[in-house]
Amino acid sequence: MPIFTRMLSTEQYGLYALYNSWLQVLTILTTLRLTYAVFNKGMSRYGDDREGFTSTMQGVTSIMTLVGLGLYLAAQDWVNALTGLPTLITVAMFAELLMTPAISFWIARERYRFRYRPIVYVTLLQAVANAGLGVIAVVLAEDKGVARILSIVAVQVVVGLFFYVRNILKAPRPFVFEYAKFAVTFNLPLIPHYLSMYAMDQFDRVMIARMVGLSAAALYTVAVNVGLVLKLVTDGITQSLVPWMYQKLEEGRLEDIESRIGQILVLVSVVVLVFIAVAPELVSLLGGSRYEASVNVVPPIAVSIVFIFAYTIFANVQFHYDANKFIMVASTVGAFANVGLNYVMIPRYGFIAAAYTTLLCYVGFAFAHYLFMNHVVSRRTDGRRILAPITLVGISVSLILGAWLLAALYDHAAARYGFTAVLVVVLAIRREDVRGVFR
């Protein structure tokens, strides 16, 4: 990111951001998010044929992607006008959509087995290849925004093709209709939920690009990408936590889950506050002087990630008990609220308003999922619950107040670093608790 924010103009980087936003929504429609909760259920349900389940999921996404490509080619002028992307870029996007799920399914299967080293190696390979080929393409090309997009597509397609073939060859039966029926039936009711999450995660950038301009979208995207460093951490914790949590739920050991979730939420909140404290320096490093205005977006985005992390944990408990309907309703309401607030606030207050409307919606979203999760757990376990309300409220209030204080100190570096030092000392004092969480 520090490389490409300096090599591309804000308009070119804005095109790259717009591509990623539409890639996310098409990923939902062409993969049905089969790499998410349903995959872990499939790994448990079809434990004697996990390779076959993986290959079948890949087959389903391939069929959906090819159907989507056919529909696009039949109405490409209308779609291009809607997305603001040219035909070349959109066709390249479908190539990425066809191959990338193969990598995602392989990674999901390895995570379920708690095998992380191969994932690290493949991830590093992709990162180095994406950056290296991207720099070469941007230097040589006149249209640098398009070159950046196509360089990423090329890497994803090559790596994805390897795992695409591997997943098929490893499976005794490459496609099993029973597996496909189970996964699609489970996930179809959740598509409104996943689309709503897209609206809350990505559509703000589309709205900013339309209502303010590509340069504003680039400024907002840099701040969001700074926050994504945190989301990579929380996503990694979630992917590790969910298989363990499912095992504890099957054993009925809710007390183990409650103690660890509370500790993890506290630890993640402290890390987020440290991150917010050094946000001005991070934005300067990753974006450069042209993106200084992005710094005020970082605090609400960073705090949002904690609530995303919390609701994801709560939702996965609901997935375990097959309680999917509330997830769809809550997500849809939250997404409409977010889009409506953006429509009113962005023209008045600029791109920064989108960060605060997103935070507000995620706070409500997390608490709604918390209440319904405990309702479901209570019904299934004779009145038991996961995580006391006072714990969640206390963590949330402390986090928001701490973020507000740090944002107010952005012009006072010494005070920010002093606050950070206090947090680090607290972590050092409670190091045994921290070690316990990591173990």
Image: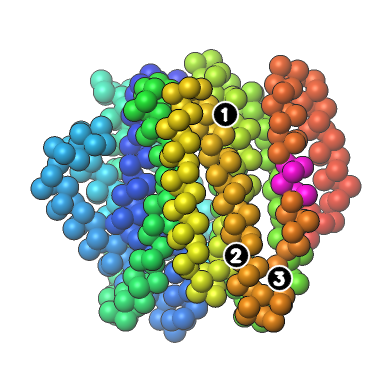
Q: Name the quarter where the C terminus is drawn.
A: bottom right
On the image, numbered disc 1 is attached to which residue?
A: 297
On the image, numbered disc 2 is attached to which residue?
A: 372
On the image, numbered disc 3 is attached to which residue?
A: 385
23 or 438, nearer to the observer? 23
Overall secondary structure of the magenta section? helix
**Badge nearest the viewer, 3 or 1:** 3
Q: Is residue 137 visible?
A: no
Q: Which residue lies furthest to the bottom in this view?
A: 48
Q: Position of residue 76 (x, y in %)?
A: 14, 41
21 or 236, nearer to the observer? 21
Residue 4 shown left or right of residue 15 in the figure? right
Residue 276 shown left or right of residue 321 in the figure? right
**Figure colour scheme:** rainbow
Q: What residue type is labelled 2?
A: Phe
389 or 172, nearer to the observer? 389
